[in-house]
Amino acid sequence: MPQPIDRDEVRRLVDRGAQLVDVLPVNEYEGDHLPGAINMPLRRLEKEAGSALDRSRPVVVYCSDSA
Amino acid sequence: MFDYEDGKLDWLAAGLPSEGTNAQRPRAGDIARKDVPTCRLDERLGDVRDRARGAGWDACVVLNEERVVFGLLRSKELKASPDLRIEEAMRPGPSTFRPFVSIEEMAAFMTEHDLDSSPITTSDGRLVGLLRRQDAAKAALELHEREHHSNGGQT
């Protein structure tokens, strides 16, 4: 189960090399995303995470909001 | 693995930078004037008016110690009795907008609601700047002309 974090913790983790993953649909990702985030829509996350992400670095996932 | 639960909207509402096609188009936070005069609730209106007008402004945003917006003084409020405290003279609780709102949306809204200016704030109410209607309209028009010309004049 992913550990919930806030905005300040996101910034701290990114400064220390964490990978940002935007799980929104591609058109929403292309409109706006956090700097450096890659797009991995939720339905592809489980399948592609292993190959696309560096297991040695923390991963931060996010979507639009908490709703 | 970590979950940034409040997500992208929280990030954008805080005025933090983003990437993507929307990031290249001007937004409320980009056009808002960061040099708007500010004042505290306990100041004297006459002093604040002199300071604002001395800086070339006819508006002032009322903040607390943490830069949270409490009110707005527009031209009409600044003309009140100079001995009033700001708390008595100000327009309390003005409508505020987030930095990521598109400038076209802001220009249209401000025109429709006849707003001369609107405070732009983060999601926790801290002032980013004051967006003036004339600046929003100008930026929206320039954006439209830029995009219209880049499309070869096609609509």
Image: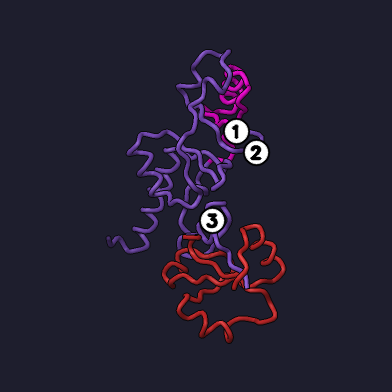
Q: Quadrant of the N terminus of chain A?
A: bottom right
Work out whether B93 lies above or below A38.
above
Q: Is residue B110 magenta?
A: no
- Chain represented in red: A
Question: At 58% across and 26% down in the image, what residue appears?
Answer: B52
Q: Nearer the viewer, residue B1 or A11?
A: B1
Q: CA distance from mark 3 to mark 2?
A: 19 Å
Q: Which residues are magenta?
A: B33-62
Question: At 50% across and 57% down in the image, what residue appears?
Answer: B9
Q: Amino acid at mark 3?
A: Asp
On the picture, is A64 further left or further right than B54? left
Q: Which residue is mark 3?
A: B10
Q: Secondary structure at mark 1?
A: strand
Residue B92 x %, y %: 49, 29
Residue B25 x %, y %: 46, 57
Q: CA distance from mark 2 to mark 1?
A: 7 Å
- What is chain B's hue in the picture? purple
Q: Which residue is mark 1?
A: B63
Q: Residues within 10 Å of mark 3 (few under 14, many from 20)?
A: many
